[in-house]
Image (tube, rainbow, N blue to C red):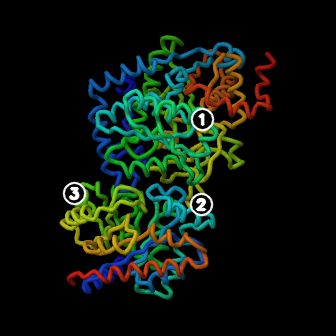
Amino acid sequence: MTERIERRLAALKAQGRTALVPYVTAGDPSLATTVPLIHALVDAGADIVELGVPFSDPMADGPVIQRAAERALAQHVGLRDVIDVAREFRKRDDGTPLVLMGYLNPIEAMGTRAFVDAARAAGIDGLIVVDCPPEEMDALEPMLREAGIAPIFLIAPTTPEARIAAIAKLARGFVYYVSLKGVTGAAHLDVGDVRTHLATIRRHLSVPVGVGFGIRDAQSAQAIAAHADAVVIGARLVHEIETGPPAQAVERAAKWLGGIRRALDAVRKDAA
Amino acid sequence: MQMSEADSELRYDLPDARGHFGEYGGVFVAETLIRALDELNAGYARYRRDPEFVAELDDELVHYVGRPSPVYHARRWSEMLGGAQIWLKREDLNHTGAHKINNCMGQALLAKRLQKPRVIAETGAGQHGVATATVAARFGMECVVYMGSEDIERQAQNVYRMKLLGASVVPVESGSKTLKDALNEAMRDWVTNVDSTFYIIGTVAGPHPYPMMVRDFQSVIGRECLTQMPRDAGRDPDQVIACVGGGSNAMGIFHPYLDRPGVALVGVEAAGEGIASGRHAASLTAGRPGVLHGNRTYLLQDGNGQIMPTHSVSAGLDYPGVGPEHAYLKDSGRASYVSVTDDEALAAFHVLCRIEGIIPALESSHALAYAAKVAPTLARDRILLVCLSGRGDKDMHTVATRGKLDLAPAARKR
């Protein structure tokens, strides 16, 4: 439900805290690990979890998340499995918002209607479709709205202001500002540039703004947290999962994310 | 770039402003690329009818590419088959040996006007990579070509040609290590370097405006045929036949004929080891609509919507999607799509070598193989126009490794 995202972000804002939003690919390192992994991330301080749907051709992702998708696909993890993960997670956690992130084709292959119904029933709160800009959302967006699932849109450094205004009309939950030109996991993050763009975005948007792509350590997370409502961390966390024995992947990921949580909480912001 | 001025009531004016051919096409890309595509769209809209642009392109096509390419009556082959007359549109005679350069020249001139000093491309067989490297050298642009590591192995000669021409060839190791993965990687490069870089897509696929723009640049093939066939063959062909991977040579030769209902249009896909084997690349024949590489079209995909590995003896047809306009033409019935196996294509390859003294590309050999099937069923006054989209020099290695199987029994008997 969109409300679960809104509630969580409003509460954090009231406390002057920045939301921590980790991304993991469902089925990496294995499907059985994914539910315990998400719980562990929440215990380590995640406020919202982005769950990646593996796709064979992840055009917008860098090598780290590509490899995660390949590991998941080697085990034939499909969209229905990802929805099952969400349903399983919800049995023990009713408060942490879950956002699916993926590409359009697996959704259409399942059937848009069937997907939206299953996602709602499983307690999924938001959806990011990387390769589906608002112009192509004619069918999906009204179904999501009706189901109370937030369509979460990306805004890039290249997005013109008029387009930001158009996206603002459809945005629910939060928007995801892609902090650099490039794929997930790329290196060069320019905080000054992010600050300028966020100021522009906030002129048009009432929903909170998350920032992702290129955040890789406590320092960059803190720098972004000074300006963003939420910090999204994907590739660097997935790197932690893939580096070392799969049996300890959950521990490694949770430990690393805990460090980021502490760094974020050291940033003081004015409570709203 | 004008439409045919045929005396027809059917006025074909697709795609719409957002790049849709019916339910196909569109713009399915990450947000970062939207502005670049809008700029490209505006740039193309501005220059496509600009007299100076059109004149420069025409001049390059004549003096650099070697256009117009002739239509050639394959008399001995037609006689051998004993039915319809087969005419070949000789795109194999273009500079760099295939139709690909028509599009690369158009896009390079556009890149120049849009002040992009760097061009990138994806390539499968290497023909589009070579054509891109060629125009980049011609205009002094930096050029990076993405190519699946598996294709690099099968097309070593074209890799060497690209390097000779000054391009960097980047091996792509992700996914199936073929054309689709090269396309993903080129997209990733473009997202990262969007300010300086022009992405020269090699086929009529990808996000709008690429399917339209590449079609327009390739339509020179069909426009020439509109005058050449009545002049040289006495009339329009009954059927126009072209191979379809992404489908750029086919769209190029089909498009000017779309509003001439008397001309049947037939696209020939790669059936590989047979459709039933599952090892093929026939997305229109055996696929379902979906979204990949920026557009909605027919795709070879599994039940989970994952894109499936493909197979064809010809690297240029080895692609799990197809241009969205072909998807539209299939559904609308204006064009029909058939498929031809590796073995059938190789047989046609050998026959053309021996009977007509023309070594065709393995891609084009698929169209030839279908013509060889259908010609004997038709009367001798029927005319088939086959797009001979490229020459086969690049395929020597593939053909030689299959050489133990002599696939030309028909030619031997004569």
Residue at 72 percent across and 48 percent down: it is B277
Q: Secondary structure at mark 2?
A: loop
> Is any atom of residue B252 visible in this view?
yes
Viewer-side residue, B4 vs B224: B224
Residue at 57 percent across and 37 percent down: it is B125
Res A143 quadrant in image: bottom left
As displayed, is residue A46 above or below residue A210? below
- Residue B268: image tag: 1
- Residue A102: image tag: none
Q: Amino acid at mark 1?
A: Val
Q: Position of residue B327 (x, y in %)?
A: 50, 43
* Mark closer to the chain start, 2 or 1: 1
Q: Position of residue B309 (x, y in %)?
A: 62, 51
Viewer-side residue, B188 vs B170: B170
Badge 2 local density, few (<14 within 10 Å), some, or many (20+)?
few
Q: Is residue B115 left or right of residue B126?
A: left
Q: Amino acid at mark 3?
A: Glu
Q: Position of residue B71 (x, y in %)?
A: 53, 17
Q: Amino acid at mark 2?
A: Gly
As displayed, is residue A119 above or below residue B48? below
Circles 3 and 1, Cβ within 8 Å, touching? The answer is no
From the image, tell me which residue sits under label 3.
Answer: A161
Res B15 quadrant in image: top left
From the image, tell me which residue sits under label 2.
Answer: B303
Badge 3 local density, few (<14 within 10 Å), some, or many (20+)?
some
Q: Secondary structure at mark 1?
A: strand
Output the chain of dot 1.
Answer: B
Question: Mark 3 or mark 2, which is nearer to you?
Answer: 3
